[in-house]
Image (cartoon, rainbow, N blue to C red):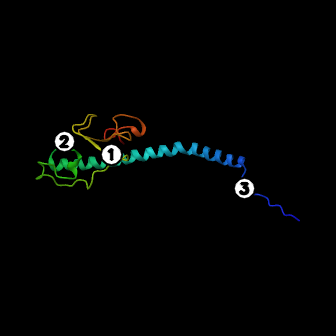
Amino acid sequence: MIKQHKQSGFTLIEMMVVVVVIALLGAMIGPTLFKKVQQAEETRVSQDIRTVVGALKFYRLDNYRYPTQSQGLEALVTVPAGAESKWNGPYLETLPKDPWGAPYQYQNPGTHGKEIEVYSLGADGQTGGEGSNQDLGNWNIQ
């Protein structure tokens, strides 16, 4: 008597069904996941900007003005030239970077209706844009 060994495994059809199901799940979940990533980036930028603007307000209380454009945000972590007697910092331990690894930008005087502006140029590092490339600053964050 010869015993026959039945081969076990998956057929091509079964494999194709699994691949199609995985692709459908990815197509449904993918856009939602990317939207959450963009929302998390915007939330982080908002929190960082609020922190930096708060530190700038403390700087202003001590020095009677905001840092000049040339002093920039660096004036929050190191003593700027000419402000040694009034500077009571550091106002921040380190300057935060935006979610894309770029330093936050500083504008004094502001150009969007604010006295000073702190902003990120977004993922592309260019002025303007939409979605993740949008400029986010203290004039348009919530």
Residue at the spot 16% in from the left edge and 44% down from the top edge: 65
Of pointers 1 and 3, the one earlier in the residue sequence: 3
**Left or right: 19, with 99 as reference point:** right
Amino acid type of the residue that numbered disc 1 sits on in the rendered structure: Ala
Of pointers 1 and 2, the one earlier in the residue sequence: 2
Amino acid type of the residue that numbered disc 3 sits on in the rendered structure: Gly
Query: What residue is pinned by disc 2?
Result: 70
Amino acid type of the residue that numbered disc 2 sits on in the rendered structure: Ser
Q: Please name whichever residue, 86 or 71, is drawn nearer the observer in this view of the structure.
A: 71
* Position above or below: 135 against 79: above
**Left or right: 130, with 57 as reference point:** right
- Please, what secondary structure does the residue beneath circle 1 have? loop
Q: State the image coordinates of residue 126 (x, y, percent, origin top left).
A: 34, 36
Quadrant placement of the N terminus:
bottom right
Dot in front, 1 or 3: 3
Residue at the spot 15% in from the left edge and 52% down from the top edge: 87
Q: State the image coordinates of residue 28 (x, y, percent, origin top left).
A: 58, 43
Query: What residue is pinned by disc 3?
Result: 9
Query: What residue is pinned by disc 1?
Result: 102
Q: Residue furthest front?
A: 2
Label 3: few (<14), some (14–19) or many (≥20) C-alpha neighbours in 10 Å: few
Instruction: State the CA–CA distance, disc 1 to disc 2.
Output: 18 Å
The answer to the question of whether label 1 and label 2 lie on touching residues, with beta carbons closer than 8 A, is no
Residue at the spot 12% in from the left edge and 52% down from the top edge: 84
Quadrant placement of the C terminus:
top left
Q: Which mark is residue 120?
A: none
**Left or right: 52, with 17 as reference point:** left
Instruction: State the CA–CA distance, disc 1 to disc 3.
Output: 51 Å
Label 1: few (<14), some (14–19) or many (≥20) C-alpha neighbours in 10 Å: some
